[in-house]
Amino acid sequence: MRENPLQTIMNPESIVFLGGSNSLQTIGTAQLITLITGGYQGNIYPIHRREKTVLGLKAYPSVSSLDKPADLAIIVIPGKAIPGVLRECGEAGIHHAIVITAGYGETGQQGATLQQELLEIAQKYHIRFLGPNCIGIVNAPLGLNTTWFPNKYRAGHVGIISQSGSYVTQTLTYFEKLGLGLSQAISVGNQADIDMVDCLEYLGEDEQTRAIALYIEGIKRPAAFLQAARKITAHKPVVAVYVGGSEAGARACGSHTASMAGPDEIYRGFFHQAGILRADNIADLFDWSLALAQQPLPRGNKIAIVTNSGGPGSSMADEANHRGLKVPLLSPAVQDEIKAITPPTASALNPVDITMNYDVDLIYRKLPQLLLKQPDIDGLLFYGIFGTIHFQDKIAHVGGPASETLAFMKQTLEKACDEFVQWPEKLKKPILCACFSGREDNAVVQIQDGGIPVYPTPERAAGAMAALWEYAKIKNRKLP
Amino acid sequence: MRENPLQTIMNPESIVFLGGSNSLQTIGTAQLITLITGGYQGNIYPIHRREKTVLGLKAYPSVSSLDKPADLAIIVIPGKAIPGVLRECGEAGIHHAIVITAGYGETGQQGATLQQELLEIAQKYHIRFLGPNCIGIVNAPLGLNTTWFPNKYRAGHVGIISQSGSYVTQTLTYFEKLGLGLSQAISVGNQADIDMVDCLEYLGEDEQTRAIALYIEGIKRPAAFLQAARKITAHKPVVAVYVGGSEAGARACGSHTASMAGPDEIYRGFFHQAGILRADNIADLFDWSLALAQQPLPRGNKIAIVTNSGGPGSSMADEANHRGLKVPLLSPAVQDEIKAITPPTASALNPVDITMNYDVDLIYRKLPQLLLKQPDIDGLLFYGIFGTIHFQDKIAHVGGPASETLAFMKQTLEKACDEFVQWPEKLKKPILCACFSGREDNAVVQIQDGGIPVYPTPERAAGAMAALWEYAKIKNRKLP
């Protein structure tokens, strides 16, 4: 089998960088700074005609002046200089490149001709390249970030392949808030050479990647894509958002990455055949990928809900039903067990609503355990996270032995959350949470970092649980 | 016309508080702390049998020991003591109350009997009350917050009526991040006396409230609700989320606020007749209310999109189309005007994609103005917010006259954003933005605080724009 070119592009031992300088006037400089400061341990060789050093690194006047060929060339120079540089790379023995520069197929016929020229040079010199018109890559375990966005990702298990650079760069702060960790992310740009199929095959094999998120404007090689996807989705979940199905979406995609979009229905059927979950929007794409990367799959669609507030519990129940999940009435015996440990105002029907109550042992330990141990409950939706941060001002106001009280509450909560995040693995059933507070809440941080997704609204948690169930069905289906 | 009881409940000059103490063991204490620290200027009289002072305020042994009747009683004591206290309030001349305590109609037949008893006492003594089983109210301009959640709301123009206390308390941090400002918020609980219709009529008249968000588990007086809503929605937008339409949703609502839920289709028709926009989830409820409260309505459904990144622009275009908006191809003349001021890699078709580019004058001033001045463009979706915060680490790394550079960039950006937020009012057309960064980005803060909503994903901005158009059609419709 031919080696996937992304093996080297995503894991280079050395990088030659074209387009960085000591001035922030060029976008390349910003990218080179991210690369230098991100923790990447390989060698970085900036090319600069005049400067001796660039951003503190020794600079080389040209690619041909390097002592030995680098694994990867990153190219952010003006388009007219690229053909020459690509030839030079080929002659210097560099066989992998990322072309960031835009102004090719996405701009019309003239750009398409230039793009074809790049491809021909690359093929002549056996260079495989990503782009043009892309933003680069992130390989989180390596600390490798070639994009120009500040290096705020966390390492994790979601892999991203995107026809938009923004969804692997400007979304990094969004991921941070959601507690979503990346394995590797690839911006494919115009896919002149390397395309989504190569990326899919590569991430399909990557052990760190447990779920793959795709942002698609149009698929270049549908047959190969389908074949690759079917093979992967039998063991690893893939979620996709497709934006080319409407008139305006198709026009936007054409001018963005020169993609040939097709009608929504065709893509819907195509994703179904491929075993790919289709998300309707970017929020769902990342929500679902996060759950799929971190939680066990449910064996069925019967979900228990635990809440300390009726409204969010009702929202979860309603959304779960709308998305094909069941929220079954609990058996009288289980209801009795619940009633024995909950306050008189509580409801034990399912949702189990303990009402306003901060018995952390009840909500984080007893109830999840009791419910997930029932053979006819396949997963748990949870609303009731409430960190001690919210008590600080109250305690300060009351005065007295305030710091001791808070320290004790904190300790109790931390212990309970610590146990809570272990239930999914111990009991082989998924838990997904919602909380209107984000990582400013210390319990949200602990639960997210412990591996259980916490979404900003109840419906988003329910939607992600439905995605787990949808993928469980895909995984179990017999392929013809 | 009889005065709406909420006039006094939402604007009391004095409050008697039953259930606060000097210990955080009771939930009432936490609520009293919020009340005291929230900025409310009226008098607060805590009732306590033994203590001389409660949380630094003079305490009274009973309601009857007050010199003169308070406007409002807030009751957070155990249920069995409430009938007696309610009688005492009546005898002391207090005619308005909020009963926070739970354990009534939502817990079954016995609770329903207790609730009926409360109602009869109240009626006998001419007391109007909110609850039981509610979390209280927020009147933002007064700094009045009777809930127990830290006082983090900002004052603004969205009014909330909710059958769940969490949606007016635990959501406060969520609102903060969205830049959503509250006018008044009411948790209605079991609606034993005051119900949603009273609240709707009250907020319909409130000048500070420019859009009303409803969280509904079931409607008690459908005919009166319909009549009130139709009157209001002819001039003020109302958005509702309804969670009782599914089997599990209905069960959850029954055990939460004793609501009688009905099938989804019936509520759908009902909302349509009432001129109420139906949101499918809590995120949409607040997203749409925010846009409706702060932006002018579009006169038609033709939207321009400005972006500095193809992916988010495509996502906006696709979602806009799916939601009934048009993203028309711009005329050749307008395209030429755009091409004259944008870089060669840009697209002028609509979305107008200026590609990666930080010409703030172009993106915040020239393009929005040019597009919104076109007679056949009714509103603008915008992706391209990028604060100077993101350049700080780059500038620090480059060294040299870093602080001057940053200061100059900041100044330029602030001036551009300042002008940007004025376009909607000047040109009488709405602008809605998306940015994956939140309020950690200085430009997001400036634009949100300047009155233009900034949503966390492109689709949410497009969805809110569609809501503006839906309400514009409702407002223009001729009612029979």
Image (cartoon, coloured by chain):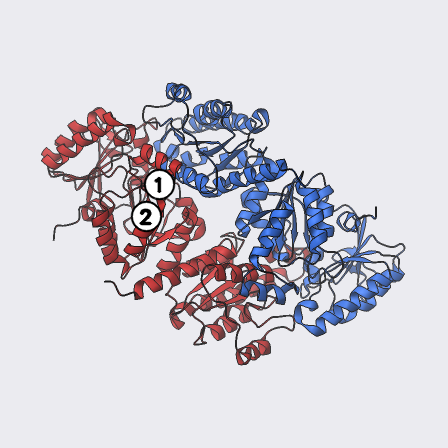
Chain colours: A red, B blue
Q: Is residue A473 visible?
A: yes
Which residue carries the number 2 mark?
A267
Name the quarter where the C terminus of chain A is drawn. bottom left
Q: CA distance from mark 1 to mark 2?
A: 9 Å
Q: What residue is shown at x 27% (from left), y 62% (from top)?
A: A235
Q: Is residue B462 left or right of residue A30?
A: right
Label 1 Cα neighbours within 10 Å, binned few <14 / some 14-19 / many ≥20: many
Decide which of A183, A466 is in the foreground and name it.
A466
- The label shown at residue A181 is none
| Amino acid type, residue under disc 2 in the picture | Tyr
Q: Position of residue A52 (x, y in %)?
A: 22, 28
Label 2 Cα neighbours within 10 Å, binned few <14 / some 14-19 / many ≥20: some
Q: Is residue A207 visible?
A: no
Work out whether A355 lies above or below A104.
Answer: below
Q: Could you tell me if the residues under marks 1 and 2 are in contact, i.e. CB atoms within 8 Å?
A: yes
| Amino acid type, residue under disc 1 in the picture | Gly
Secondary structure found at label 1: loop
Q: What residue is shown at x 53% (from left), y 34% (from top)?
A: B447
Q: Chain of mark 1?
A: A
Decide which of B275, B456 is in the foreground and name it.
B275
Work out whether B407 lies above or below A352.
Answer: above
Residue extending furthest toward the front: B480
Decide which of B138, B477 is in the foreground and name it.
B477
Secondary structure found at label 2: helix
Q: Is residue A364 left or right of residue B161?
A: left
Q: Is residue A259 left or right of residue A289?
A: left
Q: Position of residue A113 (x, y in %)?
A: 20, 28
Which residue carries the number 1 mark?
A244
Decide which of A478, A171 is in the foreground and name it.
A478
